[in-house]
Amino acid sequence: MVELFNSKLCAICKGRKLLCGRPTCPILERFRVAKKAEEKVNKRHIFGSSPPSIFVGEYGYPKVRIGPLVPPIEGKTEYLDSPLKWDDKTIKDILYYRSLLVMGETRADVSVRKSERILGEVQELAMSIKPVDSEVILKRKPVMKVVPSEFAPPLGPRAELLDFELTENPKIPRRTDYVVSDELKAEGAIMRLYNWGFDEYYIIRLLSAGLLGMDKKLVPTRWSITAVQDTIGKNLRREILDYPEINSYEVYFYRFMGNRYAVLLMPESYAFELLEVWLKGSLFGSEEPQVIHDHEDFRGIKGYANETTGAYYAARLSVLESLRARRRQARIIVFREVTPEYYAPVGVWQIRVGVKKAMNNPIGRFETLKDALEAIKRRLEHPFERYLQRSYVLGALARQKTLDQWLGKVLT
């Protein structure tokens, strides 16, 4: 695997020749974005409307950094922290949005203590469904950089927090108050909010702020994203197992933010697999890209998705939502190819959105598995036989001798 930044290569290139093979220099792009926002956020006293947004780190657990994210902008700022509504945005747009959100960070024990005033203000902010006018006082001017993440949306400038206060009453739904105050386990609270139609990232925010579950604790944002998507996915899986199987092979495809997403649905009992490749020249690509994967059957995944990590739960949830809406089950394979156009990670939300868009973009229905795979093969760049060789789900079918008649032809 190549390094994200190669000091020797970068020194020769200086962002002009793009020797790394990427369409734009990730170092210069982040510098340009930070420079564009610097005048607005380069101060110790920030007053503005939080989208609302908070962040809980994981480093040093159980002593974690937590804080509100506040832009120097008043009014309708929801767009700065609405990942599932960024389906028409570019990576540059996302980096700029996040560069405007200043984080005032403070250390806190994950055990929630109601007596801590700042934590109480952060929790009230987390429960709001509308932007909240907020005031942040920092110990020094924030460090002006944007840190991309494969899990959460990029984290913008930040500095140690001296004080934080909401200057207006947050708009908190009655149902949120009910769930937060009720003695519900975290899974029950998450599913109740999800079935009521609350935004997924709103639920993630509540979990991070230590507002859900019997034993209320702060949960790092990265962990909350996976926990919420996994919890919803498990519940949807249990539901669709009672539905009949689809009748034919179905293929879906979409290109989104430098990623290619192909989805194969098979008329078989439920199983799910994510096959992922970071192509040469992509952010974490190598000279010889490898297929990574994780899978599950009707019993669910064993442990954690160690190879594809958070991408697994995001992709699975989007497909399960589509099947639930149809009241059908299927055997599922999601193919993800990451191209050099994806020059800065912006979080697993783009996988969630990319696969959801794919499920709304059918390529066709096919009578045979061979025809369905051929349709996918034409849309992907990586040698297709390497996907087939790595796939557990297709390997299981081959062991049942349902692929013997055509497997050799596909591999040649």
Image: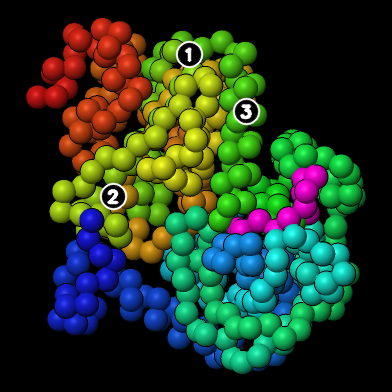
Q: Position of residue 4 (x, y in %)?
A: 29, 66
Q: Between disc 2 and disc 1, whose residue precedes?
A: 1
Asked if the magenta segment contains residue 218, the reply would be yes
| Mark linked to residue 246 | none
**Region rendered in magenta:** 211-221
At 77% from the left and 45% from the top, the residue drawn is: 213
Dot 1: within a 10 Å radius of its alpha carbon, few (fewer than 14), some, or many (20 or more) residues? some
The residue at which mark 1 appears reads as 269
Residue 57 quadrant: bottom right
Label 3, label 2: how many angstroms apart (C-alpha)?
A: 29 Å
Residue at left 71%, top 38%?
Answer: 187
What main secondary structure does the magenta stretch of the protein show?
A: loop
Residue 262 in magenta? no
Give residue 285's quadrant in the image: bottom left
The residue that disc 2 covers is 278
In this rendering, position of residue 250 left or right of residue 383: right
Residue 103 visible? The answer is: yes
